Amino acid sequence: MTSILLKNVIHEQRPCDVHIVNNRIATIAPAVAAATTTPADQVIDGHGRLAVMPAFYNSHTHAAMTVLRGYADDLELFTWLSKYIWPAEERLSAEDIYAGTRLANLEMIKSGTVFYNDMYWLPEATLRAVDEMGMRAMIGMLMICGEDGEILPRNLNASRPLLERADSLPERIRISYAPHAVYTVSEKTLRRLADDAREQGRYVHIHASETRREVQDCQNAHGGLSPIAYLDQLGVLSERTILAHCVHLSEDDIAIIRERGAVISHMPASNMKLSNGNFNFQAVVEKGRCRVTIGTDGCASNNNLSMLEEMKLVALLGKATSGDPTVAKDGLVYDMATRNAAEAFGLDAGVVAEGKLADLILVELDHPAMVGDYNIVANLVYAADTSVVHSVICDGRVLMENHHVPGEDEIVAKAREACRRIKP
Amino acid sequence: MTSILLKNVIHEQRPCDVHIVNNRIATIAPAVAAATTTPADQVIDGHGRLAVMPAFYNSHTHAAMTVLRGYADDLELFTWLSKYIWPAEERLSAEDIYAGTRLANLEMIKSGTVFYNDMYWLPEATLRAVDEMGMRAMIGMLMICGEDGEILPRNLNASRPLLERADSLPERIRISYAPHAVYTVSEKTLRRLADDAREQGRYVHIHASETRREVQDCQNAHGGLSPIAYLDQLGVLSERTILAHCVHLSEDDIAIIRERGAVISHMPASNMKLSNGNFNFQAVVEKGRCRVTIGTDGCASNNNLSMLEEMKLVALLGKATSGDPTVAKDGLVYDMATRNAAEAFGLDAGVVAEGKLADLILVELDHPAMVGDYNIVANLVYAADTSVVHSVICDGRVLMENHHVPGEDEIVAKAREACRRIKP
């Protein structure tokens, strides 16, 4: 049994002591004098100036792409991919992916994120970095098909070790099927992966309806079916499906997604940067009542992994797109990044309450961006950046204390070495 | 004579020593061994891991509104103003404005901003805070007219001390005329202020074409003239006019602004949050070749003062609105926040070069968001937040060293006290 005491931290505007035993919040009680406090293996004293809040859950990443941050920007999508990103990715070794994922983990921890839903090449290297650094993740077995409609051998080879290890991993790490998209994975493969996922109780993670062209091509190839309708016909959509982007949805698509309980990952920064089009927040979230979470995407198209920044973009873009400043209110957006995301990934977390998994952040209330101090959620969504995050606890383990993550200098140095290898 | 040595800092990818004498950059030379380095009153050692870059210039603020951060959000514009913001502003004392401006100064310094163009009530309190904390600012004498078309007596009373002190202020502080908008200031007053400004060599700072309704009302009231055409007819537009927002511009408006050399302050966060409409970046900046700078607006409608965040929003919104990911490239956006803004406000600064005013920031190259390290400007625009800013120099004076601004705790505490007074 291990225990952590968060002493004299602010919870719902009151000073509290939060006691964590193993990986769950055991008790939340009014702060008491030091002498009578329950002993603990580790104590963080908030001195009444740190608020304890739920950590963030990032629903779509390509974590290792931190090593491609700033590599190529401001380009037309196909030029960007074919001339820059794909050739660079061809050169990525497992060591580069490992270095990039560690940098991503560092960046996410520093911004209060404890979980991410990833999809990238050589996922065993990602798994290693996540395992070592103590984060939660759902790691996708990324798959693309060749002209024969079968999964590329190198994708299969990269995935096999993950499937073999899946049952022996810590609970905080899970393995998902990650067919890339409807235009890169064949019909028969999508059906088979959906069946395998169902049998094994795994999630399916896929890009869907990201660009207008993807929707048109799908309709042309599959008898007028949109990517959503097509995936539904193949049996892919369930409560364990994560649909990344969903920028171009018809009313029928929204109804299908709602009915199947599939989860959308909304990524305003990436969609804006690549000019994908405008996610219709009002229609999908507020009227459509779909399950919608927030993702940052990879660092080549964002170019950071801050859920604090992404929440603000969700709120701003929801208003700008609808022309209505009452759309995408701060509380709703905050829930999307915390409790709703935890629920979507089957984690008993996302709120600060006794019995819940201890995925927590401590927020500096004396930070300039947290004053005026009328509304902590509004400040987190609209004003804060990574510098407000003082400490981070994931699954009952302190990953960052007082802005410091063990080994940060070496993580950054190794990532920079990877960049030297990648640069043409 | 005072001098500062920035030792072993990175300038254009090379280690350099930057010597600042009084308020200007005296020399930039390859970094040399410590023993032979020119002596200086103050030395900051970059150890080869800090980049020296130009500081940011914020072209439209209501700085003191930090004390209204999070006070009311996600509301329809008129409800927000009439039920929340205006009643709260009625209660603001000079002490509140002073406390709020100090917090704003702290927040801006921490995010690398050394100058702002302000417009708010009781500007003498703002002036005091700016003077004490060593920032640059252009402080507006905010004016609104009563039903008789004359400036409200309380605005005149608040402005008089500024005009009286204008000639004895440090060079880094200037006083401007700030008629609020065409719908709150009468025709005769606008004409008179334009004349006074011209005679005295002062800037005019005004909100213009922020909402569709403002444009329609102006057209109805003034024979079909848009706010821009109307202001031009009154003689308000010149190279010393700052037009805040300019969301709704016709092609004719764009041509007038370009011809007069007037300066636009573009504020994506505020415009998105209040659903003002979409600033047409392509038409105004890229095709229109207007002089466009970047502003954060006040903290009730943003809700922070970070130019780093605002640059990203300019780039993302430019792409999202145009549907073209090659619009609003990082280098252009960066220039808008640095050299173009300095030029717009008549400051011989905005670039790191010998002879220029020493308005500089030191950026942490070992920060996770600065790796991949392919492109420092891309990283600043797309990935960085305030936590990358290590030190800030304004007008040859160190305002922040190693993330610390003298007196920060007291500044935050006093702002929080102001919030207690303001809360109904």
Image (cartoon, coloured by chain):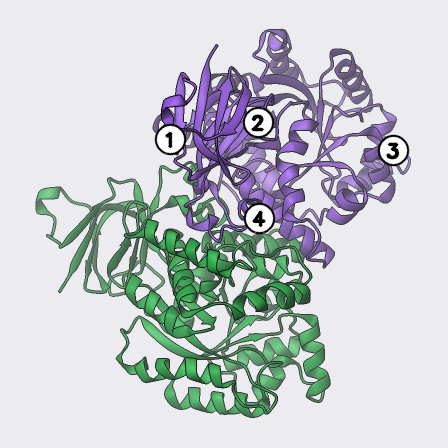
Chain colours: A purple, B green
Compare marks 2 and 1 and give the one earlier in the sequence: 2
Residue type marked 2: Phe
B16 and A164: which is toward the camera = A164
Q: Residues within 10 Å of mark 4 (few under 14, many from 20)?
A: many
Residue assigned mark 4: A378
Label of residue A115 in the image? 2
Side of A6 relative to B132 (left or right): right
Q: Residues within 10 Å of mark 3 (few under 14, many from 20)?
A: some
Whether residue A204 appears in this view of the structure is yes
User: Nearer the viewer's eye, disc 1 or disc 4?
Assistant: 4
Residue assigned mark 3: A222
Residue type marked 1: His
Residue displayed at 35% across by 55% down: B411
Label of residue A404 in the image? 1
Label 2: which secondary element? strand
Compare marks 1 and 3 and give the one earlier in the sequence: 3
Side of B390 relative to A95 (left or right): left
Q: Position of residue B185 (x, y in %)?
A: 57, 84
Compare marks 4 and 3 and give the one earlier in the sequence: 3
Label 1: which secondary element? loop
